[in-house]
Image (cartoon, rainbow, N blue to C red):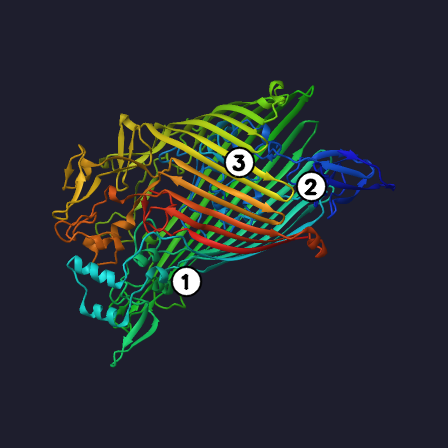
Amino acid sequence: MTLMACSWSLSAQTRTYHGTVVDGSNNEPLIGATIMPVGGGQGVATDADGKFTLKVPANVKQAKVSYVGYATQTVAIRDNMVVKLASSDSNLDELVVLGYGSAKKLGSVVGSVAVVGEKQLENIPTATFVDALQGQVPGLNIFSNSGDPSSTDNAIRIRGVNSLNAGNTPLFILDGAPVSSSVFTTLNPNDIKSVTVLKDAASVAIYGSRAANGVIVITSKRGAFGEKANVTLRANVGWSQMVEDNVTMMNSQQYIEFRDKIGSPVSQEVRDIVDKYGISTDWRKEMFNDNALTYSVDAAVSGGGENLSYYLSLNHYDADGIITMSGMRRETLRTSLNSRVNDWLRVGLQANLGYTKYGTNSQVTNSGIYVANPMVFARMAFPYDSPYYYTIDDDGQIHYGDRAMTMHYFGYNSPEWIYETNKSNRTNITANLNLYEQITPVKGLTIRAQQAVNAYDYRLDNKWLPYETTLTPMGDILGDDPNIGALNSGQSTQSFQRYYAWTFTNTAEYNILINDLHDVTVLLGEESMINKDDMFTVTSKGFTDRRLMLLQQGPNVDNSMLNQNVQREIFNSIFLKGSYNFDNRYFFEATYRRDGSSRFAPGHRWSNFFSVGGMWNVKQEKFLQSVEWLNELQARVSYGSTGNSSIPNYAYFGTVGTYNPGYGTGSNTTSTGLGNPSNPDLTWETVYAFDAALRFKTLGIITAEIDFYKKTTKDMLMQIPWSYTTGFDASYGNIGSMTNTGVDVNVQADIIKTQDWYWGVRCNFNYNKNKITELFSGRDSYTIPNTGLRYEVGHSAGEFYSVRYVGVDPRDGKQMWLDKNDNITKIYNEEENSVMTGKSQFAPWTGGFGTSLSWKGISLSVDFNWAAKKYMTNNDAFFLQNASQGYQQNQDVCMLNVWTKPGDVTMYPNANETPQFDSRYIEDASFLRLKNLTLSYSFPKNIVNVMRLSNLVLHFTGRNLWTVTDFTGYDPEPQTNMYKFAYPNTRQYEFGVEVSF
């Protein structure tokens, strides 16, 4: 750094300085560098020539100078200074928030953590930030189970599945307080500063019983003290469509041919309309919207004075679904206020308020398969049915009319008819508020109290409107009552849920540095949580007038249509953490936490959790400091325990419930009985985790990190099956154990890094081997009915258990299977011949890779994510590759290869054979997906300055642009054992503009 003299002026209260900030390697000016006075005064930024003018109080002697990609310097303020910043080739100085206590430099963190920055979260086309995390962190597996814009149904796992029946989702922390999944769609991703993923015991044990599945810490954006006001405006618009579909359904000619092959020919009438009028409907195109509109606008202002910093943002997001009755609108308001009241007291408030209004298609459900589900209808509807009513005149001319509400040949009502008669709206109002008070009574001691609430109000307004039975132009009856003109009554369901969770956290942290060598930090804390969840649902039937649909206007409300649920939960904790750093070379940490939860039985509510860890910063040793090709080298190891209490409230109670006794007593008759057996010994599930890692950087280019881990789950929480003679089917207990063993690998390389050019590549992967080591009651296995899964010692928790299908006998077209002794048989026996297949719904291999390329103001970023050896049972194929049902619904074109005569070599049996749920439907759902592609252009500073702006950026973002998979369902991404015509993920295109001033 070079300091040179220039003129200065002095007043009674402030001094004015001028200076320049340049790149230390080439003396090029740095535009937009920040100069922040230390101890008071307003910060400034450099202009197009790297120059700045700084006014500070007379007592301020230093300033911090920072710029993205460069090491921050604290310099003495002198007249006419030129500050030369050195490029930062390491991210070890990056501050990360781990939860309780002060933020730490990444290079001093003993645990296994990964940080996803704001650049990966900005301007994403989806409503939820979770989507942007896919493929970014090794060991963090995120699978989106639905493409509905309002969906929060994501399978999120950190380093495997830890439990059979208890929850496996990580704990989410927003600005120091736990939050529920409702925040996924009510938090604007542009308001997030960073997301930190905590993976091992050393980093998560401080969270104790809630951290068995890992922790994801969300840090929102804030203003900075002494920062001038900055306003950012964003506007984005785009469209969505279905991702690639690997299934081709038969057209009319093909389906007629297929029906002839199976000996169930269509009528002459059908052949005539196909031959004469060419009716051959692609129902996929009719059911899915290829240009579902998405747009968003938001504004943010941030800055701060000497003693107050602020951040305020507003966001509107609107997305149409790609099927009927789906879509979402969201408004969010976020604010962050932080005040330095005096030298020893700080207070602050972070608040996020959200309102969402959305619709979800009632026919899309995992509980059943309904033809009015657009995903089902697009597959099954006959291609020779028209999407429009038509008539044929005496001259043989066809005349098309309105959209068809029922199918003339298929015989089912269309999804559009459901949309006309079912009006459903859902609203959700959320509040995440976090207030803190912090004092520093003596140097090094910080005492902090925090009060947070995570709350939401959810409402459902679901109406089935009354209507009259009519006769369609094609002579079909439209109505449940077959009598023309008859009234089909309606019904109304109203549901309300209010949830809140108060979290009170009190901590005292003391830090002392002894002889500039020994850095010691001790944290002591206490935390209490109070949760309350109230909900009720009422259904009223028999409505006859669409204008009179209030609950009391329906003549039929009985006890079976009433539901109310009230739940309470209390959680208390104390915790202690100690950290020691010797000369920035040796780091040690130890954590202890004691948790108590009302979910467990008295006498078993409290449990202790701990962790110990160490890190060796090897590069700081004298024997390596002269090794120029090795820039960084760190080794770390940790061991500890965490808990899992993710089971329903009152699971240990012998609860009392109401039920209808039946036997002609009527729907309004209720009785009381024991609803759930008690378990006075129910207690915590505990995960013990070991982690060892090595991190290095070489040649100033390549950075790599390798983590090995082993996690052992004990006292697993599981619903243990009971004999039906007891009157119960199952209840929760602590049984068995499980292990997850694996490795995380992350590699990044900055191949080109010059003033104008940058090119970097990155890749990561995780391998995880899951194994059950013990089950209940001394058993080695337990088959889960109607799932195709079996828990067996020595095997994965998600492994499929099925009879092995080997094909069709060419002689007679009958199906063939292997029995348990590997002999071919034509008799299907699920109980006797099912075996463990070695195929699991949980992918053992997952990862992501990408590249970033920039030249001056043009930037391109491309990211892929993938999963290997992932399997699902494809329930869709059971209907679409089924000759025995082929006369009822359309079929996959592969069924043209159905067996019809001796000698046919095929996998599809004759039409008299009923397919079974065997191994043929267990499909490889491995995939490679182009998750994100972003092309942006930042206007040059000289143009931006003329426009009196600080930044102007145009961008294009594409999401899920390309997918490679062998899976024959709509989408390979969901993580489930049984795929049932699910709402597919979407391919999205978005254009946007960002303006700052």
Q: Quadrant of the N terminus?
A: top right
Q: Which residue is mark 2?
A: 339
- Identify which amino acid the numbered label 3 is placed on: Gln
- The Cα atoms of the two marked residues, 1 and 2, are separated by 49 Å
- Identify which amino acid the numbered label 2 is placed on: Ser
Residue 765 sits in quarter = top left
- Residue displayed at 49% across by 48% down: 932
Q: Which residue is mark 3?
A: 748
Q: Nearer the viewer, mark 2 or mark 3?
A: 3
Q: Looking at the image, is 655 positioned above or below residue 489? A: above
Pointer 1: residues within 10 angstroms few (<14), some, or many (20+)? some
The percent position of residue 656, horizontal first and vertical second, equals: 34, 40
Q: Nearer the viewer, mark 1 or mark 2?
A: 2
Q: Which residue is mark 1?
A: 550
Q: Looking at the image, is 589 positioned above or below residue 48? A: above
The percent position of residue 599, horizontal first and vertical second, equals: 42, 34
Q: Nearer the viewer, residue 753 or 549?
A: 753
- Identify which amino acid the numbered label 1 is placed on: Leu
- The Cα atoms of the two marked residues, 1 and 3, are separated by 60 Å
Q: Considering only order in the chain, which callout, 3 or 2, is on the residue closer to the N terminus?
A: 2
